[in-house]
Image (cartoon, rainbow, N blue to C red):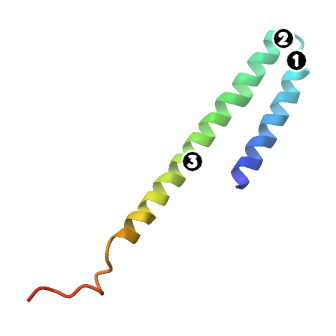
Amino acid sequence: MYLYIIAIGWAYVVLLMAATAKSFVAGVLTFVFYGLLPLALVLWLTLKRMRRLRGLANQRLDQPDRADTQPDQ
């Protein structure tokens, strides 16, 4: 949840930086290279890690506990 708030804040600041650029092209490049690309990279890496950890947690829940199983005799 906090990740999205930080991402929205970062996008807002970069948008204001782009709006104050001297030309339209400079504004677009500022928004893309200071905003979209770094933000996309950070979100992708962070959410990828969260998905991986969630998958590992679900995998552990699906496996039976070793103490609950009876060994074959």
**Residue ID at (77%, 49%):** 5
Say which residue label 3 marks: 47
Q: Residue at x 60, y 36 (%)?
A: 41
Give yes or no for contact between labels 1 and 2 (Cβ–Cβ under 8 Å).
yes
Calculate the distance from the C-alpha at mark 2 to the C-alpha at mark 3.
32 Å
Q: Nearer the viewer, residue 34 or 72?
A: 72
Of residues 70 and 25, which is closer to you in this image? 70
Residue depth check, mark 1 versus mark 3: number of the one nearer the observer: 3
Label 2 is placed on what type of residue?
Phe
Q: Identity of the amino acid at label 3?
A: Leu
Locate the C terminus by quadrant: bottom left
Instruction: Return the x and y of residue 12 as percentages of the image width and height.
Output: 83, 35
Residue 21 numbered mark, or none: 1
Image-based side of 25 in relation to 57, left or right: right
Judging from the image, what secondary structure is the residue with disc 1 in?
loop
Q: From the viewer's perspective, is 6 left or right of 52? A: right
Residue at the image point whose x is 71% and y is 23% from the top: 32
Answer with mark 1 or mark 3, whichever residue precedes in sequence.
Answer: 1
Q: Quadrant of residue 34?
A: top right
- Location of the N terminus (image quadrant): bottom right
Q: Residues within 10 Å of mark 1 (few under 14, many from 20)?
A: some
Q: Position of residue 68 (x, y in %)?
A: 30, 86
Amino acid identity at mark 1: Ala
Question: Tag 3's secondary structure?
Answer: helix
Whether residues under marks 2 and 3 lie with C-beta atoms below 8 angstroms apart, the answer is no
